[in-house]
Amino acid sequence: MTAPVIQPDIAIIGGGIAGLWALCQLRNAGYQAVLFEQEALGSYQTVGSQGMIHGGIKYALSGALSNSSETISSMPGVWRECLAGNGKVDLRNCEVLSEDFYLWSDTGLTSRVGSFFASKLLRGRVDRLAPADYPAVLANPAFKGQVYRLIDLVLDAPSLVKTLADQSDGAIFSIDWNTSSLAVDSRQAIIDTPFAQVRPRQLILAAGAGNEGLVQALGGSSPAMQRRPLQQVIVKHEYPEPFFGHCTGGSPSPRLTVSSHRTSAGEPVWYLGGDLSTEGADWEPQRVIERAKAELDELFPWIDFGHCEWRTLRLDRGEPRQSALKRPDTAYVGAVDSVDNALVTWPTKLTLSPDLGNELEHTLARRDMRPGPSADLAPLAGLGQPPIASAPWDTLFS
């Protein structure tokens, strides 16, 4: 029996933040969109993020705003609109871990950076705090540095994934590439599954580092991808106070970034990134852990963390290739060179997901693509639905 042919407006491959955000925003714009994910929704990069929605200040530690900072400065406000139910994607059910994010120096900022943070340019985005307003972690007489509060906020990544997935019930399907495949017919990308052949008017590749293989499966060579690896450190401990902050160091990026989480059993966890995770990306895990221990001992000597357990998580950030492997400044959408109906997307940062959704809408409009009649998706039900990925502190300490 020949498999039926389904022709939705849009098919998305990849169930991380890029694919899920695109699915919700495009469906809300009237397109019939479906999404395919081979593992759990949010696997790897999305649930492995620290959940920070930032406005780029962490890239201004040299005392100047980069293009990246200017591009993403509006993002915390956009996300807050969505969290209030007033944006292009409804995030009212998403758990906010913290409305505040801090930047601190264990000694003091250079005069250049201090003057920059006090400038009119950053008014309303950075506030220097008096000691009485310090977060509990830094409210100790032994701390002699400076503390700033940023406009950034922090979301629980698995909650974000679930919130997006719940809005697209019936449009998200599991796919097994051992039994399904990408194919090309007359320069049109199609998806062959055991239950139906999907011929979308537009295919969107949103699989992070997996996009490279998907482009190759379509016979393409462009857009090219780069990988920027990092190795985060996770410490499960007994200190009760949560903390979300960047520590400044000698480089333009944060020396250490801390976000606080809890395991499903309620145990406190600090998730450590920043220069620690990038400089130690290719180190043996124990070496990165020893560096993390030294950082916490030096930066928080007054804290008794109690019994600690340590793990590392290595991630590859997939991004459009840049000269000298520089960090991209904006969300990216580009056409696959081997077909006429496929786009590759990378948000490049969690915080830029709304920017990615808007860029996709603009790209579809430039291609003169409007929502069409709905196709019957019933044949795809046999594929099943993927689960939500667990947070890394629940899998690594189990």
Image (cartoon, grey):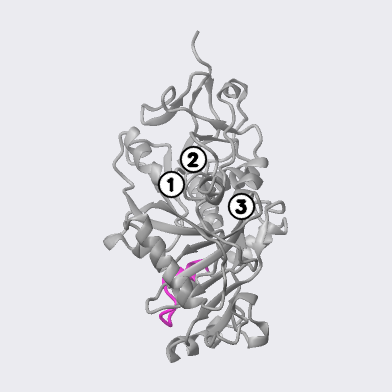
In this rendering, the label closer to the viewer, 1 or 3: 3
Q: Is residue 177 magenta?
A: no
Is residue 157 something that shows in the picture?
yes
Dot 2 and dot 1 residues touching (CB under 8 Å): yes
**How much space separates mark 1 and mark 3, taking CA atoms?**
26 Å
In this rendering, the label closer to the viewer, 2 or 3: 3
Mark 3 belongs to which amino acid?
Thr
Q: Residues within 10 Å of mark 1 (few under 14, many from 20)?
A: many
Q: Which residue is tagged 3?
A: 263
From what the image shows, is residue 203 above or below residue 69?
Answer: above
Q: Earlier in the sequence, mark 2 or mark 1?
A: 2
**Magenta span of residues:** 61-72
Q: Earlier in the sequence, mark 1 or mark 3?
A: 1
Q: Position of residue 55 (x, y in %)?
A: 54, 69
Q: Position of residue 325 (x, y in %)?
A: 30, 60
The residue nearer to you, when weighing 318 against 258, is 258
Q: Is residue 68 magenta?
A: yes
**How much space separates mark 2 and mark 3, taking CA atoms?**
26 Å
Mark 1 belongs to which amino acid?
Gly
SS for dot 1: helix
Q: Quadrant of residue 337?
A: top left
From what the image shows, is residue 269 above or below residue 385?
Answer: below
From what the image shows, is residue 238 above or below residue 18?
Answer: below
Count of numbered badges drawn on the protein: 3
Q: Which residue is tagged 1?
A: 208
Furthest residue toward left:
324
Mark 2 belongs to which amino acid?
Gly
Q: Which residue is tagged 2?
A: 14
